[in-house]
Image (cartoon, rainbow, N blue to C red):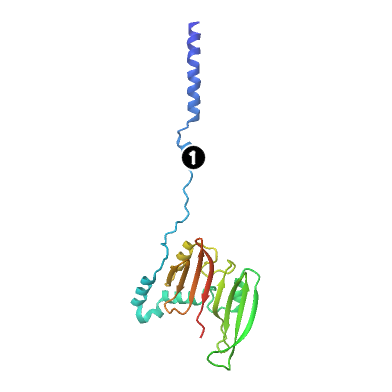
Amino acid sequence: MWRLLVILCWLPLGVHGACQGNQEPDSPRVARAGVKPKSTAPKNSYAPNFNNLARMEAFYERLQLVSQENPEVMKAAAFINNPFLPVEEPVLQHYAAQIRTKLQVLKDTVTNQHKARYIDTLFQLNFDSSTVELYYPMYTKRFLLSYADIKSPNLALRNGIKVGCSRQELLQKLLDYKLFIKEQKNVIEVCDWERTSWLRFHLSKGKVSSIQYEGYID
């Protein structure tokens, strides 16, 4: 009888010990499952009112008269003169194919400012409250981008910048070129060393809300 009492007294302790062993609350697997992965989203690493004007001035001063022959300078000039299309000599059809929405094309004639006997053509592409103007001189027969006001993501720049992209992404992609970049009051202004053509990016809540372009037409 006394042996049965001893067995009954030890039985609860054995059951309790087995449950604790099955739970293993402090095991590495359970601990890892409760830890949430850290976010890998990129943080904004550019100070407000960013500009690289002094650095670009020093870069071009070092090049002096050979700047036009420098590959990086040529890359920057090619981008600022033709920011929307990767082709060297864009035509009206190239722009129409690039725009990813319904498009209206208007045409008007203008007198050439140097030779009155030349009648040039101005093409206006309208879509999503946005406008692209192409100038077509009679004597060169080459389309020139003269103006753009883009408020829609349906026309991106050739390096992927478009309405809706973040300030961080915008600056990262612009810094791939030897361009003068100046930010002030939610506007980032970009030009090349000749300062004849401009891109202006308007920002709202840290994202591009519109893109404006002014080209040089002679």
Q: Residue placed farthest to the top in the image?
A: 1
Provide the secondary structure element on which disc 1 rests. Answer: loop
Image location of residue 161, percent across then percent down: 52, 67
Q: Residue placed farthest to the bottom in the image?
A: 117
Q: Which residue is the site of mark 1?
A: 34
Q: Is residue 145 visible?
A: yes
Q: Along the line of sight, which residue is nearer the eye, 181 or 175?
A: 181
Image location of residue 59, percent across then percent down: 36, 74
Indicate whether 122 appears above or below 72.
Answer: below
Image location of residue 69, percent across then percent down: 40, 80
| Res 93 quadrant in image | bottom right
Q: Is residue 157 visible?
A: no
Q: Residue placed farthest to the front in the image?
A: 185
Q: Along the line of sight, which residue is nearer the eye, 180 or 204?
A: 204
Density class for disc 1 (Cα within 10 Å; few <14, some 14-19, many ≥20) is few
| Res 150 quadrant in image | bottom right
| Res 27 quadrant in image | top left
Q: Along the line of sight, which residue is nearer the eye, 186 or 74?
A: 186
Image location of residue 6, percent across then percent down: 47, 10
Residue at coordinates 57% horizontally, 80% vertically from top-left? Answer: 134
Q: Is residue 69 left or right of residue 143?
A: left
Indicate whether 105 appears above or below 5.
Answer: below
Q: Along the line of sight, which residue is nearer the eye, 161 or 212?
A: 212
Q: Amino acid at mark 1?
A: Gly
Q: Is residue 163 left or right of residue 50?
A: right
Counting every numbered tag in the picture gives 1
Residue at coordinates 48% horizontally, 13% vertically from top-left? Answer: 9
